[in-house]
Protein backbone atom coordinates (compact mmCIF):
# COMPACT_ATOMS: atom_id res chain seq x y z
CA UNK A 1 0.00 0.00 0.00
CA UNK A 2 1.39 3.39 -0.91
CA UNK A 3 1.87 6.18 1.58
CA UNK A 4 -0.21 9.35 1.46
CA UNK A 5 1.13 12.52 -0.14
CA UNK A 6 2.12 14.19 3.13
CA UNK A 7 5.80 13.25 2.70
CA UNK A 8 6.55 15.75 -0.05
CA UNK A 9 6.92 19.47 -0.57
CA UNK A 10 6.12 21.02 -3.93
CA UNK A 11 7.44 24.31 -5.20
CA UNK A 12 6.44 26.19 -8.33
CA UNK A 13 9.57 27.38 -10.16
CA UNK A 14 10.01 30.52 -12.23
CA UNK A 15 9.97 28.42 -15.42
CA UNK A 16 6.47 27.13 -14.58
CA UNK A 17 7.66 23.66 -13.60
CA UNK A 18 7.02 22.17 -10.16
CA UNK A 19 9.80 20.70 -8.08
CA UNK A 20 9.02 17.87 -5.65
CA UNK A 21 11.11 16.91 -2.63
CA UNK A 22 11.01 15.08 0.67
CA UNK A 23 9.69 17.11 3.61
CA UNK A 24 10.36 16.90 7.36
CA UNK A 25 7.51 14.47 8.00
CA UNK A 26 8.79 12.17 5.27
CA UNK A 27 12.27 12.22 6.77
CA UNK A 28 10.90 11.64 10.28
CA UNK A 29 8.58 8.78 9.33
CA UNK A 30 10.95 6.99 6.94
CA UNK A 31 14.27 7.54 8.68
CA UNK A 32 17.53 7.38 6.73
CA UNK A 33 16.85 6.45 3.10
CA UNK A 34 19.25 3.86 1.70
CA UNK A 35 17.78 3.52 -1.80
CA UNK A 36 15.28 5.42 -3.94
CA UNK A 37 13.86 4.28 -7.26
CA UNK A 38 12.88 7.37 -9.26
CA UNK A 39 11.00 7.26 -12.59
CA UNK A 40 12.93 8.40 -15.66
CA UNK A 41 12.61 11.76 -17.41
CA UNK A 42 9.58 11.70 -19.68
CA UNK A 43 7.49 9.61 -17.25
CA UNK A 44 3.96 10.95 -16.83
CA UNK A 45 2.85 11.15 -13.19
CA UNK A 46 -0.73 11.11 -11.97
CA UNK A 47 -1.67 12.89 -8.76
CA UNK A 48 -1.97 10.04 -6.26
CA UNK A 49 -0.42 7.54 -8.69
CA UNK A 50 2.79 5.56 -8.20
CA UNK A 51 5.78 7.85 -7.81
CA UNK A 52 8.88 6.47 -6.07
CA UNK A 53 9.92 3.37 -4.18
CA UNK A 54 12.17 3.80 -1.17
CA UNK A 55 14.15 1.52 1.10
CA UNK A 56 14.60 3.35 4.37
CA UNK A 57 15.56 2.74 7.96
CA UNK A 58 11.94 2.48 9.13
CA UNK A 59 10.07 1.34 5.99
CA UNK A 60 10.30 -0.13 2.52
CA UNK A 61 7.44 1.40 0.60
CA UNK A 62 6.02 2.93 -2.55
CA UNK A 63 5.06 6.59 -2.27
CA UNK A 64 2.33 8.29 -4.28
CA UNK A 65 2.91 11.37 -6.40
CA UNK A 66 1.71 14.68 -4.95
CA UNK A 67 1.46 16.18 -8.45
CA UNK A 68 0.41 15.36 -12.00
CA UNK A 69 2.68 16.10 -14.95
CA UNK A 70 5.61 14.91 -17.00
CA UNK A 71 9.02 14.50 -15.34
CA UNK A 72 11.42 16.92 -17.03
CA UNK A 73 14.34 16.60 -14.57
CA UNK A 74 15.56 14.05 -12.03
CA UNK A 75 17.96 14.84 -9.19
CA UNK A 76 20.61 12.26 -10.11
CA UNK A 77 22.64 13.15 -7.01
CA UNK A 78 20.01 11.70 -4.66
CA UNK A 79 19.52 8.66 -6.89
CA UNK A 80 23.26 7.95 -6.65
CA UNK A 81 23.49 8.99 -2.98
CA UNK A 82 20.11 9.09 -1.18
CA UNK A 83 21.77 10.71 1.86
CA UNK A 84 20.86 14.05 0.25
CA UNK A 85 17.24 13.32 1.08
CA UNK A 86 18.14 13.64 4.77
CA UNK A 87 18.98 17.30 4.22
CA UNK A 88 16.35 19.96 4.90
CA UNK A 89 17.87 22.06 2.09
CA UNK A 90 15.43 22.10 -0.86
CA UNK A 91 18.37 22.58 -3.24
CA UNK A 92 19.62 19.13 -2.16
CA UNK A 93 16.53 17.10 -1.24
CA UNK A 94 14.44 17.61 -4.38
CA UNK A 95 13.58 14.45 -6.29
CA UNK A 96 12.03 15.45 -9.62
CA UNK A 97 10.83 18.46 -11.56
CA UNK A 98 7.55 18.12 -13.46
CA UNK A 99 5.92 20.16 -16.18
Image: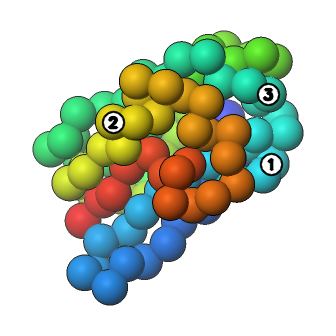
- For label 1, the crowd category at 10 Å Cα-Cα, with few meaning under 14, some 14 to 19 and many 20 or more, is few
- For label 3, the crowd category at 10 Å Cα-Cα, with few meaning under 14, some 14 to 19 and many 20 or more, is some
Label 3 close to label 1 by CB (< 8 Å):
no
- Residue 54, quarter of the rendered image: top right
The residue drawn where x is 54% and y is 17% is 35
Location of mark 1 (residue): 25
The residue drawn where x is 53% and y is 65% is 10
Label 2 close to label 1 by CB (< 8 Å):
no
- Residue 69, quarter of the rendered image: bottom left
Distance of label 3 from label 1 (alpha carbons): 10 Å
Disc number at residue 91?
A: none
Q: Position of residue 66 (x, y in %)?
A: 52, 55
Secondary structure, mark 3, is: loop
Q: Where is residue 43 in the image (x, y as percent from the top left)?
A: 21, 40
Is label 2 or label 3 in front?
2
Looking at the picture, the colour scheme in use is rainbow
Location of mark 3 (residue): 31
Residue 89 horizontal side relative to residue 95, left or right:
right
The answer to whether residue 32 shows anywhere in this view is yes
* Depth order, front residue of 47/72: 72
Amino acid sequence: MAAKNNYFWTKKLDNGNTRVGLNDQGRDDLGKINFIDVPAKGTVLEDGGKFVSVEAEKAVTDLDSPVAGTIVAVNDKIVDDPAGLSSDDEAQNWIVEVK
